[in-house]
Amino acid sequence: MKKMLPLILALTALSSSLLNAQDISGDWQGTLNVGGGLRTILKIAKSDIGGWTATLYSIDQTPDGIPATSITLQGSVVSFSVDMLHVKYQGTLSTDGDSITGTFTQGNPLPLNFKRATKESAWSTDSSPHQVQFVNVEKDVKLEVLDWGGTGRPLVLLAGLGSTAHVYDHFALKLISSRNRSTE
């Protein structure tokens, strides 16, 4: 047994270092159990200076992502924070690297389990059919304009309180169908 102890210790150290070398880059998706459920995507990329960068998306609220303030992988523990939203997350990466089981905290702690997205299972961050263009207002100032099409006189919707035009993604489609019916 004494001869086996160094081998067991070496295998334990090797498996620990392999887990530390785990590549967590990619898209991770899970549903936060709030209201009817909020689909959440965490896009993780390797940083140019080592470590990771991440962007958090709440795709049922807006297709715009918010950069994570920090993200770490220590052993099998994945942690990130988004200070702008007062969000903290801590979860455990599965041994196969395909899921993270953890807790999302924004005031109250809630379970949030992520699955690594595949090409077949990936959720879209912007499914609303529109054209995007930018209008220069003055030097170094431009506005993003989303055009959902339709007929008749143009209707301008302005987003406020720090929101983007994407707050109208679902609402604009209802306006288009009702305006098209009224012009027929």
Image (spheres, rainbow, N blue to C red):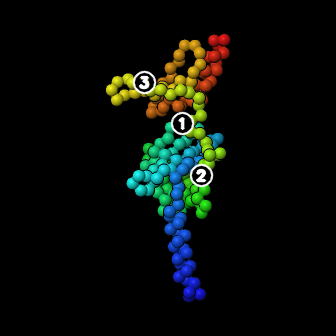
Q: Earlier in the sequence, mark 3 or mark 1?
A: 1
For label 1, the SS is loop
Considering depth in this image, is 1 or 177 the residue closer to the camera?
1
* Front: mark 3 or 1: 3
Q: Is residue 99 visible?
A: yes
Left or right of 169? Residue 164 is left
Which percent across, then down, holds residue 24? 53, 55
Q: Earlier in the sequence, mark 2 or mark 1?
A: 1
Q: Residue at x 59, y 31 (%)?
A: 128
Looking at the rendered structure, which numbered label has been put on residue 162? Answer: none
Which percent across, then down, holds residue 60? 59, 38
The vertical placement of 68 against 172, above or below, is: below
Q: Residue at x 53, y 42 (%)?
A: 57
Question: What residue sits right under mark 3 in the picture?
Answer: 135
Which percent across, then down, holds residue 162? 45, 33
For label 3, the SS is strand
Question: What residue sits right under mark 2 in the picture?
Answer: 116
Instruction: Give the crowd class for mark 1: few <14, some 14-19, many >=20 residues within 10 Å.
Output: some
Amino acid at pointer 3: Val
Contact flag, marks 3 and 2 (Cβ < 8 Å): no
Instruction: Give the crowd class for mark 2: few <14, some 14-19, many >=20 residues within 10 Å.
Output: many
Question: What residue sits right under mark 1 in the picture?
Answer: 62
Instruction: Give the crowd class for mark 3: few <14, some 14-19, many >=20 residues within 10 Å.
Output: few
* Front: mark 2 or 1: 2
Left or right of 123? Residue 78 is left
Query: Residues under labels 3 and 1: Cα distance?
Result: 21 Å
Which percent across, then down, holds residue 97? 58, 59
The vertical placement of 116 against 171, above or below, is: below
The vertical placement of 74 against 150, above or below, is: below
